[in-house]
Amino acid sequence: MSTMTTIQKPFGTPETRPDSHIARRAMIDSQLRTSGVNEEYVLARMIAVPREDFLPAEKSAQAYTDRAVSLGVNGHLASPLFYGKLLLEAAPAPADRVLVVSGGTGYLAALIAPLAGAVTEITAAEAAALEGAGEYDLLVIDGAIEQLPEGLAAALADNGRIVTGLVLREVTRLASGRKVAGSVSLQPLEDLGIPVLPAFAAPKRWTFA
């Protein structure tokens, strides 16, 4: 049975609307299947978890749109397609110890929890300052990063996997990689609209005319 350590959600859980299941089914048919996300374990998790439960009440009507919902300083709920593609690429397994870097809602950890052996969720700020010790088989990041901090990379076990958003030349892309011989390299997979996590911004470079 999976276990999960979670951060406190910044919002209360609103009452799920009666049409929520219909909206989730429409999300799967019109946003995921049409973009090549057809694996049953991915679709099963995304229809099981109501997105509106991870939004404040005034934002719940936006839960099933095809774009990210901004929560200001509290983070974001990314698009359904991002989560579908991320789950597909990550392929969490029952033996996996998973570290989830939250986008601020807890939604991604809720999707993954029944699929993995253990799930630990931390904030982006905590992740940026983390000094890991090779504990995790899988690292998933709910957002796009410009750089991967050394301490967060160190949290991955050797041959551990990572799936994240990546900012390259001001374009966000889904990316994945592995930790080999102590080093993590990321391979961009496809362009995708992904909220950027400021905690992982690269240092600014000075240029001179």
Image (cartoon, helix red, strand yellow):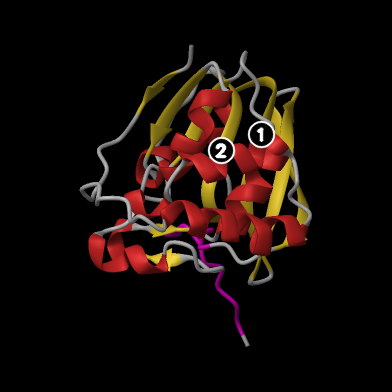
Q: Position of residue 175 (x, y in %)?
A: 71, 49
What amino acid does circle 2 point to? Answer: Arg
The residue at 43%/44% (across/down) is 107
- Residue sitting farthest toward the bottom: 209
Q: Position of residue 89 (x, y in %)?
A: 72, 40
Q: Is residue 180 left or right of residue 207?
A: right
Task: Tell whether position 201 is magenta.
Answer: yes
Mark carried by residue 91: none
The residue at 75%/60% (across/down) is 35
Mark carried by residue 45: 2
What amino acid does circle 1 point to? Answer: Tyr
Tally the marks.
2
Q: CA distance from mark 2 to mark 1?
A: 6 Å
Q: Main secondary structure of the magenta part?
A: loop
Which quadrant: the C terminus?
A: bottom right
Q: Which residues are magenta?
A: 195-208
- Residue sitting farthest toward the left: 12
Within 10 Å of disc 1 (Cα), the crowding (few <14, some 14-19, many 20+) is few
The residue at 49%/27% (across/down) is 113
Pointer 2 and pointer 1: residues touching (CB < 8 Å)? Answer: yes
Residue topped by disc 1: 41
Q: Is residue 82 left or right of residue 75?
A: right
* In front of the other: 26 or 11: 26
Q: Is residue 169 left or right of residue 189?
A: left
* In front of the other: 25 or 175: 25
Q: Position of residue 205 (x, y in %)?
A: 56, 68
Quarter of the image holding residue 181?
A: top right
Q: Is residue 206 left or right of residue 90?
A: left
| Element carrying mark 2 | helix
* In front of the other: 5 or 202: 5
Q: Is residue 181 at least partly visible in the picture?
A: yes
